[in-house]
Image: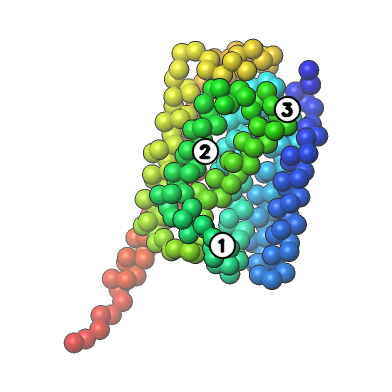
Amino acid sequence: MVAPSDWSLDPDGFVTAGGLVVVYAAANRVFPSPHWRVLCFAAGVAVVFLTRVTPIATIANHYLLSAHLLQNVAIAEWAPALLVLGIPPALGAFLARAPGVRVITFPPVALGLWLLTYIVWHLPWVYDAALEHPRSLLHLEHLCYLAAGVVLWWPVFQDAPQRLGSGGKAVYLAAAFVFASPLGLIVSLLGRPIYPFYEHAPRLWGIDALQDQRIAGVAMTVEEAVLFFCLLAVYVTRFFHEEETRDLLPTAGP
């Protein structure tokens, strides 16, 4: 059994992070990005890398459900948001011309794909199967989370292939929280462990399996509330500012 302080040498994190860096560097030669976008993309890559090679990955894969849900949230929400923010509009418009992008980034479809990914990979038999096959299914799980997260954030941070106004983005973010939050609440409120893998895993810091599950569910719900409501506040404020600006514009005469 690996120690919880061990770093993971699984190639998954190295390959994914390295691939993202290479592709972005090549794209940046054709579609130069301002420094703040490069920093956002670099931060997204860092989240992907660090959650897969540091002791967070070891604890998630062998000890605690709460660490695993933290890892999932980072890969499915934080990293994709930063990666999409790092894409300049010209590159976003170019990528939006690829076949199928218009369909999967249509807001209801994007939100549905992200929710479906979360639900399927959190089914107990699927969740445990991924943990029992860390070099195949677990890698696929992480890839699905990352891809679904990119699709989720695309309508928020990119204006192509369709532009969603500030009001529409606020509604979209509110819907994302409303539909995603029940998953964390269900995990936290159940009176028994639902993932046999963690029920039989070695315990850390005196946390039993049910406590671990409750911490995981509450942390997931709180994180999503903070993330989505902060962004929701930004776009609601922007919407009202745009409406006030529009009202102040002089109207054309007859």
Residue 58, label in figure: 3
Residue 1 in the image: state x and y as whole percent.
78, 17
Name the kind of residue labelled 3 in the image: Thr
Name the kind of residue labelled 1 in the image: Ala
Residue 152, label in figure: none
**Mark whose residue sits in front, 3 or 2:** 2
Numbered disc 3: secondary structure: helix
Residue annotated with mark 2: 117
Q: Quadrant of residue 146?
A: top right
Tell me if label 1 and label 3 are in contact, CB under 8 Å: no
Which one is in front, 113 or 85? Answer: 113
**Mark whose residue sits in front, 1 or 3:** 1
Horizontal side of residue 9 vs 89, given as left or right: right
Indicate the quadrant containing the C terminus: top left, top right, bottom left or bottom right.
bottom left
Residue 111 in the image: state x and y as whole percent.
45, 46
Horizontal side of residue 81 vs 230, given as left or right: right
Name the kind of residue labelled 2 in the image: Thr
Residue 39 in the image: state x and y as whole percent.
67, 57
Q: Which residue lies furthest to the left in this view?
A: 254
